Amino acid sequence: MGEYSLRRREVVRQLLEGRGGLLVISGLGASSWDLAAAGNNPLDFPLWGAMGGAAMVGLGLALAQPERKVLVLTGDGEQLMGMGSLATIAVQKPKNLRIVVLDNERYGETGRQQTHTANGVDLVAVAQACGFPKAQTIYTVDEVETLKNDIYQGNELLMAVIKIAMTNDLLVLPPRDGTYLKHRFRGALLGSEIAFE
Amino acid sequence: MAESEETHNLEMSGHWAEQIFTILKQQNITIVSYVPDAGHLKLIELCQADAEITSVVLTSEEEGVALAAGAYLGGKRAILLMQSSGVGNCINMFSLIKTCMFPFLTLVTMRGEWGEFNPWQLPMGQSTPAVLEAAGVIVQRITAIEEIGETVEAAAKLAFNSYSPVALLLSQKLLGSKSFGRK
């Protein structure tokens, strides 16, 4: 635990700049606000609830679309609630799935209470023990750039925990009508005629 | 004897599992997730042996709810197989299904309702229909072997054509109760 220099908004913007056809699922809370601040793309599916479910939504999407890269962007608290899903995902090992945890070691939406990662729990070690072929902790801008290359150019399941500072960011909210988000995403991915299916 | 009774139940399970499997294939369900139950044994084996189906073993049932939502976002259909004791694990994740109107189909093998030996199965088994309905899930039930194919087909059509969550309960009377070696 400690002071980290990376700032979440800058990290997310860096990872998503020039994203092309990358499909992005974000976990509830600040990760969804970061995603909205980075551009509110039709290929974003930001969760406003379903805590612990982001990685599994990502797995379902990755299995359904094996030719597309899928990025799950979530927080330490959200991923801790879905820790079992790391085992489930490692069994499947989809080559097109990337899980990135923005880890400020706090429950940011509820008063900044410490999460387990502030107290020694290491999600990268959990992912490694589950059998993720690649899992790493990231502290610097250069490491974020290497991760970005792995996300877009790599061909294996990966998880990264990015240690970030606790920051006060402008609240940028994505649309919160779930049916709109669903239709927008499916239309952008599968074509607008999918609504007539 | 207990052993032959359980063998008989598994043979029965094999008979209707093939009917369900045929319907899943017809309905283009290609992702099957599960926390196992003895009642689903044969169906899980059939899915695992099929090259066009991805079988996903879960650590907890709510993972299968989120998985189904992601699969639908990507244009595929999924189903969750679980026993009634897993229903309670899914409740908060159902918010994803309801809020976004995702189609969702689950086949629930019932415990704690018909000749149950294990008292620990009763609280969740007895409350399964009420809990599902409180969460906004449509509950349908299979009680007779003759109606299994048409009921699964109707539930799948209801879920995927009306973008609704549907739970199909397989009665313990159909599955047989586990006796733990006692008469």
Image (spheres, rainbow, N blue to C red):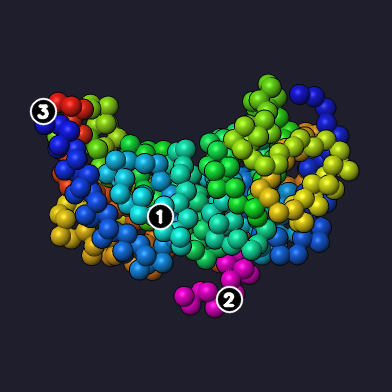
Distance CA(mark 3)–CA(mark 1): 35 Å
Quarter of the picture containing the C terminus of chain B is top left
Q: Measured along the vertical axis of the image, is residue A75 above or below residue B96? A: above
Task: Point out the stretch of residues depicted in magenta.
Answer: A185-197
Examine the residues drawn in magenta and state their main secondary structure: helix
Q: Secondary structure at mark 2?
A: helix
Q: Is residue B124 visible?
A: yes
The residue carrying mark 1 is: B49
Q: Secondary structure at mark 1?
A: loop
| Coordinates of residue B125 in the picture (x, y in percent) | 26, 37
Q: Nearer the viewer, mark 3 or mark 2?
A: 3
* Residue drawn where x is 73% and y is 49% of the image: A34
The residue carrying mark 2 is: A192
Mark 1: amino acid: Ala
| Coordinates of residue A9 in the picture (x, y in percent) | 79, 46
Q: Measured along the vertical axis of the image, is residue B63 above or below residue A16? A: above
Distance CA(mark 1)–CA(mark 2): 35 Å
Q: Is residue A184 visible?
A: no
Mark 2: amino acid: Ser
Return the residue found at the far top. Answer: A119
